[in-house]
């Protein structure tokens, strides 16, 4: 257990560039007009950047230090959970405290766009957290595959899904329904349940990929 917590500590500490870039975007991004984007939206950038560092920077270093692949995998999941909680907390606070006093007629926060704020604010924050957790795990697994044939096949499949499903109305509806379930969904039980289910499935895939991964 100590090894896992040591890995979590190292993963979070080595992610400084992601923290700095995200902080600068949140503090410095500006919008003008009657309708503006909430600066809290930029906190999601941390969820997008972090898997790149965990996969391409930290993995090799931790393996050279003698960490086991299992401990690395668990450490990544714990770190993603911590970051998802932190990002959701910060964006929720921005939405509650800063967005209402912003000098604009309408401030667009992704929590509103995704219909999460139709629930209790705590429930909305949980929906955001589990969605961001899913995003980070998905990116981690996808990035871990990139040096192998099944990674290229997955990339091709994702591109094909977008290219084929988007122009065909019936298939576009299927794609839209998928995102409505995991993201743009006011039903907290359904949305959180699907995010957890997909996160668990992707974690299993990620562990399978990790076992076959070499330095």
Image: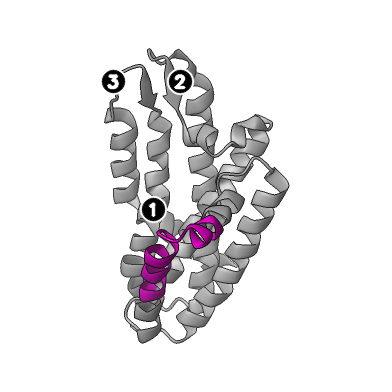
Q: Earlier in the sequence, mark 1 or mark 3?
A: 3
Return the x and y of residue 106 as percentages of the image width and height: 44, 19
SS for dot 3: loop
Q: Alpha carbon of mark 2 to alpha carbon of mark 3: how far?
A: 16 Å
Foreground residue among 83 and 203: 203
Residue 214 showing in the rendered view: no
As drawn, which residue projects farthest toward the front? 169
The C terminus lies in quadrant: bottom left
Magenta span: helix, strand or loop, mainly?
Answer: helix
Which portion, as a residue range, is magenta? 155-174
Q: Alpha carbon of mark 1 to alpha carbon of mark 3: how far?
A: 25 Å
Kindly identify the residue that appears in the image at 45 percent across and 61 percent down.
Answer: 168
Return the x and y of residue 155 as percentages of the image width and height: 36, 73
Kindly identify the residue that appears in the image at 38 percent across and 12 percent down.
Answer: 103
**Is 158 in the magenta?**
yes
Residue 2 showing in the rendered view: yes
Q: Quadrant of residue 66?
A: bottom left
Is 104 left, or right, of 28 in this rendering? Answer: right
Foreground residue among 10 and 132: 132
SS for dot 1: helix
Return the x and y of residue 131 as percentages of the image width and height: 55, 50
SS for dot 2: helix
Return the x and y of residue 185 as percentages of the image width and height: 61, 44
- Residue under numbered circle 2: 98
Is 16 left, or right, of 97 in this rendering? Answer: left
Q: Quadrant of residue 121?
A: top right
**Is 168 in the magenta?**
yes
Q: Which mark is residue 40?
A: none
Q: Which mark is residue 32?
A: 3
- Residue under numbered circle 1: 48
């Amino acid at each position: 257990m100590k090894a896992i917590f040591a890995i979590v500590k190292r993963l979070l500490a080595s992610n400084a560039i992601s923290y700095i870039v995200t902080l600068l975007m949140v503090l410095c991004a500006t919008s003008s007009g009657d309708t503006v984007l909430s600066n809290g939206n930029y906190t999601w950038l941390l969820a997008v950047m972090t898997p790149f560092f965990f996969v391409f920077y930290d993995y090799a270093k931790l393996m050279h230090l003698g960490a086991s692949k299992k401990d690395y995998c668990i450490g990544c999941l714990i770190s993603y959970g911590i970051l998802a909680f932190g990002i959701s907390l910060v964006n929720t606070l921005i939405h509650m405290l800063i967005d209402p006093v912003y000098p604009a007629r309408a401030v667009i926060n992704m929590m509103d766009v995704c219909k999460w704020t139709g629930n209790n604010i705590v429930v909305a924050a949980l929906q955001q957290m589990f969605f961001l957790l899913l995003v980070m795990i998905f990116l981690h697994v996808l990035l871990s595959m990139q040096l192998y044939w099944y990674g290229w096949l997955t990339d091709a499949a994702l591109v094909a899904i977008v290219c084929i499903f988007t122009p065909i109305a019936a298939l576009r509806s299927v794609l839209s329904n998928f995102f409505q379930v995991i993201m743009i969904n006011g039903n907290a039980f359904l949305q959180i349940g699907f995010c957890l289910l997909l996160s668990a499935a992707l974690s299993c895939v990620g562990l399978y990929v990790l076992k076959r991964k070499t330095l």
